[in-house]
Image (cartoon, rainbow, N blue to C red):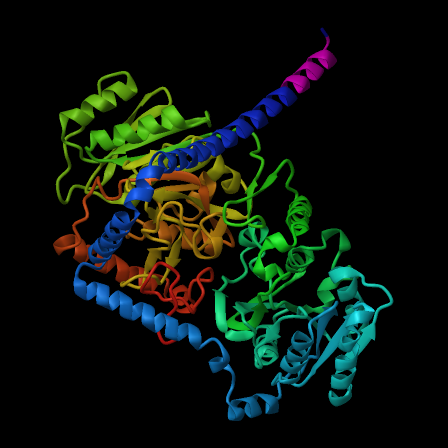
Amino acid sequence: MGETDYRKAYEEERLRCEELTGRIGDMAGRMAELEAKNEELERKLNRIRGNILWKLMRPALSVLRWGKRQWVRLRNCGSLKGVVQKLNYKRRERAAMRQFGTASFPTPEEAAAQRETVFPRMVKISILVPLWNNERQFQVELLECVMNQTYPNWELCLADGSDEAHSYIGEICREYAAKAGGRILYRHLETNGGISGNTNACLQMATGQYIGLLDQDDLLHPSALYEYVKAINEQEADYLYCDEITFQDDDINHMLTMHFKPDYAPDNLRANNYICHFSVFSRELLDGEELFRTKFDGSQDHDMILRLTDNAKRIVHVPRPLYYWRSHSGSVASGIEAKPYAIEAARGAVAEHLQGHGFAHFKIESTRAFQTIFRIRYEIIGTPKISIVIANKDHAEDLRRCVSSISEKSTYGNYEIIIVENNSVTEEIKSYYGRLLGEEYKIPAQAGKGTPAGDGGLQRGGRIAVVTYRGEFNYSAVNNLGVKYASGEYVLLLNNDTEVITANWMEELLMYAQRPDVGAVGAKLYYPDNTIQHAGVVIGLGAHRTAGHTHYRQNRQNLGYMGRLCYAQDVTAVTGACLMVKRELYLAAGGLDESFAVSLNDVDLCLKLRGMGLLNVFTPFAELFHYESASRGLDDTGERAERYNKESARFREKWKKELAAGDPYYNPNFSLDRSDYSLKPGT
C-alpha cells in the first residue's frame, strides 16, 4: 500500500469521523427535545387524569389557588406590607404606561422649539410607505402623523398598488400632497407589486440622504424624526431604531404591548426581528442593493435589517416608544397566523445571513414563544476538550450529585473534571475523592487564617482530577488554580451545587463559545422548585446597583419578556455558576479578579471580555438545576454582608463608566429595582 493510498484512506476516515461527530450532535439535540416533550406530555397527562375531579371541584380549587397566590405574595414580599407595596408598584407602573401614549407628545411650546432647532446636519429623511387597499381612516391618520412631525426636512414617498375599488386612496394622497409644499410624492402603480415591489417603487422616488420605513396602517410619534436627526448629529448614526407600542381600537392609548428593546444585539436579531420598527438608515448602506427582496416577502424587513446592520458603522437605538403599530384583522401585529408565509421567509432570511457570515450546517427552528422566534443550532467544529472546573469544600452529597449528573447525562464525551479542593474537613468527602480518583486521597492540613494561599498539588484519576488549593477561601483564586491545571481548549466553570438537566448542555454552550466573536456563554439555571435562578445578568440591577439576574424566580415555563426566555441572546454577563469560555480568552482577560474573593468576579470577567470586543451569550437550551449557595450558605449578615458591601463598592468604582452608561441589553425604561422587566414607576 503506497503513500497515496494511505493518504486517501486517512482522508476517508477523517471525513467519516466528522460525519459521525455531526450525527452525535444531532442525536444529542434530539434527545434534549424529546426530554422537553416528555415533560410537557407528562404535565398534559396529569391534567387529563384529574379532569373529572377538576369539573367537580373547580370552585373549591379556584379558592385554593387564590389562597396560594396570596401566600406566595406574602412569602415573596415578606409581609402584608410587602403585598401592599407590590400592588402600589403595579399601580404606578400602569400609570407609567399611560405616559407613553398621547401624554408623551410634545406640548405646543416644545413642538415649536423642536421645529426651530437647526442641527449641523439637517439631513432629509425620505419616508417610504407602500400602499395597497388601505382603509380611509388609516390613510388619513398616516398622512396626518407625518405632517405633524416637528422635524421639517422630510419627504413622504407613496407608491400605491390599490385596486379601482380603493381609488379614494389616491384622492386623499393628492389632497394632502397639495398642502405639503412638495414634500409628499405620490405614484399610482399599474400593478400591485406587494410590499417589496411597492416599497422599492417608493425608493425610486426618494431623494433623501436617509430612508425611513413606515407601514400604511401605523403611526409615528410627533417627535420621531426630531429624535432621530438628533441622534444622527450627536452619535453619527447610520442605522436607527426605537421602541414601539402595539395598540388597538384606533387609539394609541389602548396599548396591547410595549416593546422596550435592547441596543444592537446580533444574536437577538438572528433569532428574532426585535428591531422591527421604526428603521431609518443612511442610503449609502444599500450600496446598490435592493431595499426589499421579493423572495423574502412576509419577512422582507427582517432580511433588510440583517443586511443593512451588517453594513452599518454606527447602529443607534433611541430608547423611546416613537412608533405605534396598529393591531387589526389582517395585520401581522394581530398574529403571525394572518400571514403564514412569513415564517418560511424569516427562516430563509436568517439562513442567508448566517451563510454570509461563514456558518454552515446550522439548523433554524421555531420556538414555543412564536413561530418567527428561532432556535439556531450551530455546527460544532471538531470535538475540542472541555475542562470543567468545580470549586469544592466538603458537601460530598452536592458534589456527588453534580459529578454524577455530568457523567450519566452528558452526550458530549471529550471533557475532564477538575475539582479544586479548598479546606474540606470531613471523612465523607475524602472517601468520595478516593472513589473518583480510584486511589486514596489525603487532604492536606487545613490552612488557617493568615496562611498564604498556595498550590497543594494535584491527583488525577482518568478524566477526573483533584487539585488542592491551600489558603483562605477565595472563589476567584480557587478557580484560577483549577484553570492552571486545565488541559482543555475550553474552560467550564461550574458550581458544585448544580445538576445537569439537558443531555446536550455542553454542546449548547460550546456552539457559541467556539465562535470567534464570543467570550463567555451561560446556561439557564433553575431552583429545585422549577423557578428561574439565572437567565442572564444585567449590570446596575438590584439594591447594590452592581448586577442582578433577570426573570429571577419566574416559572420555568415562562416565555419571558417578549419571548426572551426562548432564544439565545447577547447579554452583558452570565453567572459563573455555569460559564464556558475559551481557555486562551480566560487567561488573556486575567482570569477571575482575586480582589473579588466571593462575589461579582464572574460579572467582572464578563465585562473584561466585553472590553475585548467580544459578545457574552445566554442560551436557554443548556439547562441545569442550581441549589444556590448550598455549599457556602445564604447568610447575608455580619462579616459576609460587610465583605459583600466592600466588593460591591469596588465593583462600582472599577466599572463606574459602564454602570453610568447603563446595560446596553436592558432598556433604560425598565426599573433597576426589579428583575421582571417592570417599567420604572413614574417614567
Residue 63 as seen in the image, left or right of residue 214: left
Q: Quadrant of residue 624?
A: top left
Residue 645 as seen in the image, left or right of residue 548: left
Seen from this angle, which residue lies furthest right? 190
For the point 57% across and 65% down, the residue is: 327
Residue 323 as seen in the image, left or right of residue 564: right
Instruction: Work out whether residue 429 or residue 531 is closer to the camera in this orientation and state it.
Output: 531
Q: Position of residue 631 (x, y in %)?
A: 21, 39
Instruction: Work out whether residue 561 or residue 625 is closer to the camera in this orientation and state it.
Output: 561
Instruction: Work out whether residue 650 or residue 205 is closer to the camera in this orientation and state it.
Output: 205
Main structural element of the magenta stretch: helix, strand or loop? helix
- Segment colored magenta: 2-13
Which corner quadrant holds the N terminus? Answer: top right
In the rendered view, would you say 606 is above or below 290?
above
For the point 33% across and 62% down, the residue is: 674
Instruction: Work out whether residue 72 or residue 50 is closer to the camera in this orientation and state it.
Output: 50
Q: Is residue 513 visible?
A: yes
Q: Position of residue 260 (x, y in %)?
A: 48, 65
Residue 524 as seen in the image, left or right of residue 435: right
Q: Position of residue 415 (x, y in %)?
A: 42, 28
